[in-house]
Image (tube, grey):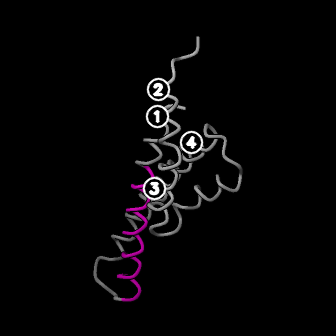
Amino acid sequence: MKKSVLTRYRVMAYVTGVLLVLLTLGVIAKYLLDMDGAADFTRVVGIAHGWLYVLYLVFAFDLGSKAKWPVGKQLWVLLAGTVPTAAFFVERRISAELEPKLAEGASTPAQV
């Protein structure tokens, strides 16, 4: 597996996580605080998060299939983009797990 597969997953995990936190804050501002402009903010961030979450799903599934994860772990990573802040914690755990394997694979000579 290439390091770029992990890198694009990590980028999308952060983007998805930040947008979900912003969306949560927007929903709180809209419904609990009744703030002006919160409805437009929530709509824009919600649409952005929705489309980028689909991209996150593609990259996370690609990473999981190349890492040969069991189905349960794959689902756990895929659902992390739906719980505010979970994407950050899951991304750190996945990166800590895979980076040593990637470094190990890079230090061995290529097979012909």
Q: Nearer the viewer, mark 2 or mark 4?
A: 2
Does the magenta run of residues contain 31? yes
Question: Is there CB contact under 8 Å for labels 2 and 4?
Answer: no
Residue 112 vs residue 32, the one in the foreground = 112
Q: Secondary structure at mark 4?
A: helix
Marks 3 and 4, the one that precedes in the sequence: 4
Write down the region rendered in magenta: 12-32
Residue 107 vs residue 71, the one in the foreground = 107
Which disc is residue 103 wearing? 1
Marks 1 and 3, the one that precedes in the sequence: 3
In the displayed structure image, the side of residue 107 where residue 26 appears, left or right: left
Q: Nearer the viewer, mark 1 or mark 4?
A: 1
Q: Which residue, given by chain and number where applicable, does mark 4 sit on?
A: 63
Which disc is residue 92 wearing? 3
Q: Residues within 10 Å of mark 3 (few under 14, many from 20)?
A: few
Q: Residues within 10 Å of mark 1 (few under 14, many from 20)?
A: few
